[in-house]
Amino acid sequence: MSTSRSHGRVADMPTYALVDANNFYATCEKIFDPSLANVPLVVLSNNDGCIVARSAEAKILGIPMAAPMHQWKGFCAKHGVAIKSSNYTLYGDMSARMLAILQKLCPEVESYSIDESFLKLDGFGDVTAMGHEIRQTLQQHIKVTCGVGIGPSKTLAKFANHIAKKHPEYGGVFSVQGVTEAVFEKLMASYSAGEVWGVGRQLSKRLAADGIETVLDLSRCDAKAIHQRYGVVLAKTVRELRGEACISFEDIAAPKQQIISSRSFATCLTEFQAIQAAVSHHLSRAAEKLRAQNSVCSHVYVMINTNRFREQDPQYRQTILTPLPHPSADTSVLMKAAMAGLRKGFVTGFRYHKCGVILGEIGQADDQQTDLFATVDDPKRLRLMSLMDSINKHQGAGTLHVASTQLSDAWHMRANNRSPRYTTCWDEFPVAYA
């Protein structure tokens, strides 16, 4: 594909920073366990299935991301690799602390993921110095090391963050505005287009087939031609790589149109009560996420299925849709629909491997059309839901919960190597002895 013009930057452009914690899950584990300081460490997925995080030492050993743990268990034992089950309570709390620090340092902060946030640095003067201050403050207060990428668009800030982490000479902070055009273009030419935010493996292959192999190649493409061949999203990416801010905070933080909560069981289940407890848990979590984005839903789906990899077992897979009488975010209303769907879909005689819920047809709570003949959520119930969410946010997930989630413990996921929830559970607080 022909190229049009080269990357350019303007002094009065907006300035974004992406702050991204290094090896976040592994770092959280090491912060509270000094014995792991220089030890290679991996963190496992739900039910201890796959490797989802690696410390810097584990990466040096060549342990790949998403590798099945059973295939690497011997290797880890041979090389002294510490193995930890996911501790999402700990990671979530550390993420909240990281976000709180960033909000004190900058008035405009947008949480992008559990370990990443965008900051608007307009008016901060020396933004590179601000980046170093962010790094030092996070390290001082919560012992989290991060990379800071700074640029006139979110896509450039994301790419700059990648450079900050890959090039030690920049001290963990790289600003697009802080280097010459020639230096930055040389860096762009040294990375494949697949390193750009939003360019996946398959799209990268398509781009390469069209002669667009590096980040620099992509930045020099004609946005209109890219729009015609690849669509509006990649066209925006091209414009962002050239310094034009096309992605606002609202574009990133748009409410989800579908909320899913599901998980495999540690062992296959056959009893209705155990699966009912799991569905109750997933529904409660999904409802909390729904209220967090000030939304309501009109449909509740319940999914249950057996393990398709166990060919010796009879197979069964079912998804049941239950429409609500009116759009709602009340856990009790959604729970009633979920339980009705589960009772309809559950069949005895199968070994169930996974269940979950999907909240569909989501809309904003403030934009609902009222119905003269339909009931609406009780305002007292909504205040109760808000209170529950607030308590669980500050005291830890599940502090207040629907009783049916405790009908059985059989559904809980396997986490044989989980570290203590150091910051959110009184019984697991670290203790220092004189």
Image (cartoon, rainbow, N blue to C red):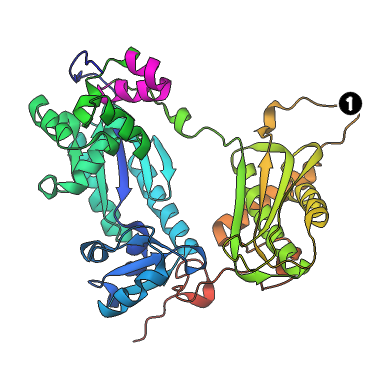
Residue 334 image point, x, y percent: 76, 47
Q: Is residue 82 left or right of residue 276?
A: left
Residue 423 image point, x, y percent: 46, 67
Q: Amino acid at mark 1?
A: Leu
| Residue at image coords 51%, 63% | 46
How many numbered markers are drawn? 1
Q: Is residue 191 above or below residue 54?
A: above
Q: Is residue 367 magenta?
A: no
| Residue at image coords 36%, 60% | 53
Residue 125 is at least partly visible in this image: no
Magenta span of residues: 225-243
Towards the viewer: 126 or 25: 25
Residue, disc 1: 372
Q: Is residue 242 magenta?
A: yes
Q: What main secondary structure does the magenta stretch of the protein show?
A: helix
Dot 1 falls on a residue whose secondary structure is: loop
Q: Is residue 278 left or right of residue 430?
A: right
| Residue at image coords 65%, 36% | 295
